[in-house]
Image (cartoon, helix red, strand yellow):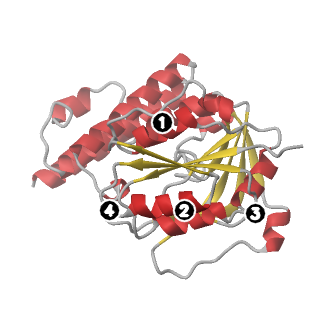
Amino acid sequence: MTPPLISVIVPVYNVQDYVAQCIESIINQSYQNLEIIIVNDGTKDNSADICRKYAEKDSRIVFLEKENGGISSARNFGLDRATGDYISFVDSDDFLYEKYFEVLLHHLADADIVFCNANFYKTDADLTFPSNESLISPQTVEFSSIELLQKINTFKKPLVIVPWGKLYKKEIWKTIRYPEGRSHEDETIVHEYIDRAKKIRFIDLPLYYYRQDVAGSETHSIDLRKVNNYYQACLNREAFFLKKGMNKEAAKIYNNGKSYLIRKSIKMKAQNENTTFSAILKDPKLFLSSKFELIVKKLIYKS
């Protein structure tokens, strides 16, 4: 019996210092039945040349090229061309533990999504790896879709939100794609694919290695466009929760998004209709505790 095929989608953009380690960690996995979809998103450095050389040596690698459109566009490009039974995303400046796919596939079992813990590290840091003993019977947590939606912002943050560190049944992505041309794309759709899963399993093993100190990374820069994108993602999830009758969760996500928008706007001294004293006090959906915190911050930054 042929083992299931896993489509691994790797968007690549200006990561010449890291992409070889990423690809090596994928091609050397203990689980070998992989379709490795590398998407060159218009990279301007030598990343594409590095990827081509690996593609020439490994027939499992599908090297695709497109004009720069951002990480959402690259992931969608890969999703549209994936032929595997399962889907996984790997960021090209990260790398995987050697038994990453073997362990995730084993624990997927009757679930639709499985995800694991991560090592958040800085380049040149001393790294630790799971022992063989820890792989035998790791601690796991199971959720229904509703249970994980209720804990979407609290359980092992940010592991629920991010697309990497997970293995998905392909059907989960049948009608879902990332919004293009905006940041916080993961926040925008995570509730949609959780909602499509009957069971989700978490493995408390750090099998994914996330690099924290990449220069120019989207994660490490912030501006008003990104702040507004995050706020819009929160509004999208609020509407989703309200539609499902999850009013308590809807109120929390609205407060989370609106408070974030106002706090960041005040800090950047960006005046808009949301940051006035009157707007803060009159917003009927903001919790009293949120209003008090925001008024204090506005007074501090005003002085």
* Secondary structure found at label 2: helix
Q: Position of residue 202 (x, y in %)?
A: 70, 50
Name the residue type under label 2: Tyr
* Secondary structure found at label 3: loop
Q: Which residue is mark 2?
A: 54
Q: How far apart in space, not on screen, are marks 4 and 3 (Cα)?
A: 31 Å
Marked residue nearer the N-terminal end (1 or 4): 4
Residue 30, which numbered label?
3
Q: Position of residue 227 (x, y in %)?
A: 29, 43
Name the residue type under label 4: Asp
Q: Which residue is mark 1?
A: 76
Q: Residues within 10 Å of mark 1 (few under 14, many from 20)?
A: many
Q: Residues within 10 Å of mark 3 (few under 14, many from 20)?
A: some
Marked residue nearer the N-terminal end (1 or 3): 3
Q: Which residue is mark 4?
A: 45
Say which of 268 and 65 sits in front: 65
Question: Farthest residue in the right direction?
Answer: 1
Q: Residue at x 67, y 74 (%)?
A: 129
- Above or below residue 92? Residue 282 is above
From the viewer's perspective, is the residue at label 1 or at label 4 nearer?
4
For the question of whether residue 293 can be seen, the reply is yes
State the image quarter where residue 194 is shown. Answer: top right
Say which of 178 and 196 sits in front: 178
Specify whether 248 is left or right of 171.
left
